[in-house]
Amino acid sequence: SQQGEEDPQALSIQEGENATMNCSYKTSINNLQWYRQNSGRGLVHLILIRSNEREKHSGRLRVTLDTSKKSSSLLITASRAADTASYFCATSSYGGATNKLIFGTGTLLAVQP
Amino acid sequence: NAGVTQTPKFRVLKTGQSMTLLCAQDMNHEYMYWYRQDPGMGLRLIHYSVGEGTTAKGEVPDGYNVSRLKKQNFLLGLESAAPSQTSVYFCASNNGQPQHFGDGTRLSIL
């Protein structure tokens, strides 16, 4: 079963605007990651936030994590047409022998030039 | 440095046919994974491997088999393809985080 649910499913904005997408998950996690997928390509890692962190920045990306609400948000500031892609959250949980990830259903972001 | 390479990129099969998807990584990663991606479903884990000679079931393993005879290669097999296995298949590998993905194999079963 899917761990993460993402909201919204699709988002269309103008170049220069900010884009915010949200992820909710169900069980305790070790870390939460965000990936981007351009059309017809594989997933590319964007940022990882650990369960003991509340906020993390990387360039134009800002990720927050609220473990009490089991939710995370990804903010892309000053969006560009090249940011058009699908964005997925993925969680890594405690226990188990691997670095298995459980992915959310994704948000499709369209940035209009 | 090619990263994760998947072959083939596209394939059309008839119901009941068999085939093998190949994943190769050149990053000396211990862990490798096979996912399928369907519309509106995100990625779901089929099988994974924690090292050469090991495999384990993921979330949706039925109808698939895997082998990890060499550390750099992870093979996904469909013994008797079914239309429900029409999907895009992704391979990934890592040692810690994050996972590194190939560009996928688009598989259609008629």
Image: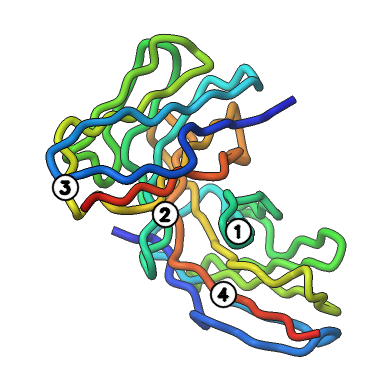
* The one of A43 and B15 positioned closer to us in this rendering: B15
The residue located at (30%, 25%) in the rendering is B66
Subunit under mark 1: A
Depth check, mark 3 against mark 1: the one in front is: 3
Q: Earlier in the sequence, mark 4 or mark 1?
A: 1
> What residue would you read off at disc 1?
A37
> What residue would you read off at disc 4?
A108
Amino acid type, callout 4: Leu
> What residue would you read off at disc 2?
B43
Question: Residue A92 placed where, x, y %?
Answer: 49, 47
Neighbour class for label 4 at 10 Å: few (<14), some, many (≥20)? many
Amino acid type, callout 2: Leu
Kindly check if marks 2 and 3 are in contact, taking CB atoms under 8 A apart as contact.
Answer: no
Query: In terms of secondary structure, where does tag 2 sit?
Result: strand
The residue located at (43%, 23%) in the rendering is B74
Q: Which mark is residue B82?
A: 3
